[in-house]
Image (cartoon, rainbow, N blue to C red):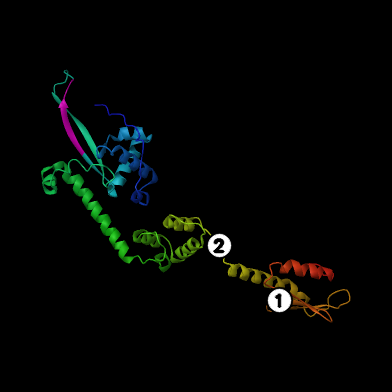
């Protein structure tokens, strides 16, 4: 029997828990959105790997890999069975032939309907009486339990950075995810950038990740900028101006220069001119003054 051609759904919605799942490839997340769209009416999506591959314009191996990844991480479950139907080809000896039908259920509650095999049957009777479910369903249950156990173990040992505790709009699970992936210094720096941001940040979790990954620089405070100016000017004075100390400067030797802790002073016989390191124009001002004394840099 030829597979029915599938068309991409008008709307493919990818839930947040799928978007942040690092175990799911980006292409598989898009595929999940398409499955969810196809499952919107009936509660499940159906089709062969060939039909899905044609719909997504990719290979069957990619479809197989995406389905396995989504199922391993508990986002879908697959139910496959053989359905008999009467053979219309009279030349064949068998009156009936079998068609393999697969239903793919979205396990995160996105679909309107629940699994039609689950909603009317008690759990024990269904698993016990339907051999086709024993392997697939029990395997899925074990994988989910293993993942939950693994996540619980991680959560017990991850310590959330104190600066991150103060950030609102991030769940505890996402805070632990950040602390697991990045160092404390990286998180502290990103949180400082977040607090210094003048714009309202609607997604602080995404902002912090982007700040770390793209090496955002925290805006400097006025005090930090002032300190940088002082350090730069003092370094210039100690490196270049100290050579003129204890020397007579000017055409008539009427000037002298001293490099001090907070400023530079140039003396004459009657006056003293002060150039402070905290001035942003310190270097330009003192160069102009020394040029007047015929001192060339």
- Circle 2 — which element? loop
Q: Position of residue 130 (x, y in %)?
A: 13, 42
Quadrant occupied by the N terminus: top left
- In this rendering, position of residue 25 left or right of residue 117: right
Magenta stretch in the rendered image: 80-88
**For the point 22% across and 52% down, which residue is it?**
142
Please give left or right for residue 126 compared with residue 248 in the image. left
Q: Circle 2 is placed at which residue position? A: 219
Who comes first in sequence, dot 2 or dot 1? 2
Query: Considering the numbered disc 1 on the image, is that residue within a helix, a strand or a loop?
Result: strand
Please give left or right for residue 208 compared with residue 221 in the image.
Answer: left
Residue at left offset 30%, top offset 46%: 70
User: x, y percentage for residue 236?
Assistant: 70, 70
Q: Main secondary structure of the magenta part?
A: strand
Q: Residues within 10 Å of mark 1 (few under 14, many from 20)?
A: some
What label sits on residue 213 in the rendered view? none
Eyeballing the image, is 73 above or below 4?
A: below
Residue under the point 20% across and 46% down: 137
Specify the farthest residue to the top.
91
Based on the picture, tell me whether residue 295 belongs to the magenta stretch.
no
Of 93 and 168, the residue lying toward us? 168
Residue 14 occupies quadrant: top left
**Mark 2–mark 1 distance (CA, rounded to whole Å):** 28 Å
| Residue bearing the label numbered 1 | 263
Is 86 contained in the magenta span?
yes
Residue 189 drawn above or below residue 13: below
From the viewer's perspective, is residue 37 above or below residue 272? above
């Amino acid at each position: 029997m030829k597979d029915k051609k599938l068309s991409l759904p008008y709307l493919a919605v990818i839930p947040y828990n799928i978007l942040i799942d690092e175990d799911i490839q980006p292409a598989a997340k898009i595929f999940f959105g398409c499955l969810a769209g196809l499952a919107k009416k009936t509660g499940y999506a159906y089709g062969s790997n060939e039909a899905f591959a044609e719909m997504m314009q990719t290979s069957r191996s990619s479809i197989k890999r995406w389905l396995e990844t989504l199922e391993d991480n508990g986002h879908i479950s697959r139910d496959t069975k053989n359905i008999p139907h009467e053979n219309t080809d009279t030349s064949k000896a068998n009156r009936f032939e079998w068609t393999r039908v697969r239903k793919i259920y979205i396990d995160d509650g996105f679909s309107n309907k629940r699994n039609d095999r689950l909603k009317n049957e008690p759990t024990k009777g269904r698993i016990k009486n339907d051999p086709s479910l024993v392997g697939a369903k029990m395997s899925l249950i074990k994988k989910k339990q293993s993942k939950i156990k693994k996540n619980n173990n991680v959560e017990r040992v991850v310590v959330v950075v104190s600066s991150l505790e103060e950030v609102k709009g991030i769940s505890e699970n996402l805070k632990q995810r950040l602390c697991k992936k990045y160092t404390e210094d990286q998180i502290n720096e990103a949180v400082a950038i977040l607090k210094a941001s003048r714009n309202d940040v609607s997604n602080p979790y995404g902002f912090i990740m982007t700040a770390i990954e793209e090496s955002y620089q925290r805006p400097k405070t006025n005090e930090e900028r002032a300190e940088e100016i002082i350090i730069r000017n003092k370094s210039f004075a100690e490196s270049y101006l100290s050579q003129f100390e204890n020397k007579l400067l000017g055409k008539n030797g009427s000037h002298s220069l001293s490099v001090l802790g907070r400023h530079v002073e140039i003396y004459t016989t009657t006056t003293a001119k002060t150039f402070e390191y905290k001035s942003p124009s310190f270097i330009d001002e003192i160069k102009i003054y020394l040029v007047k004394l015929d001192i060339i840099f």
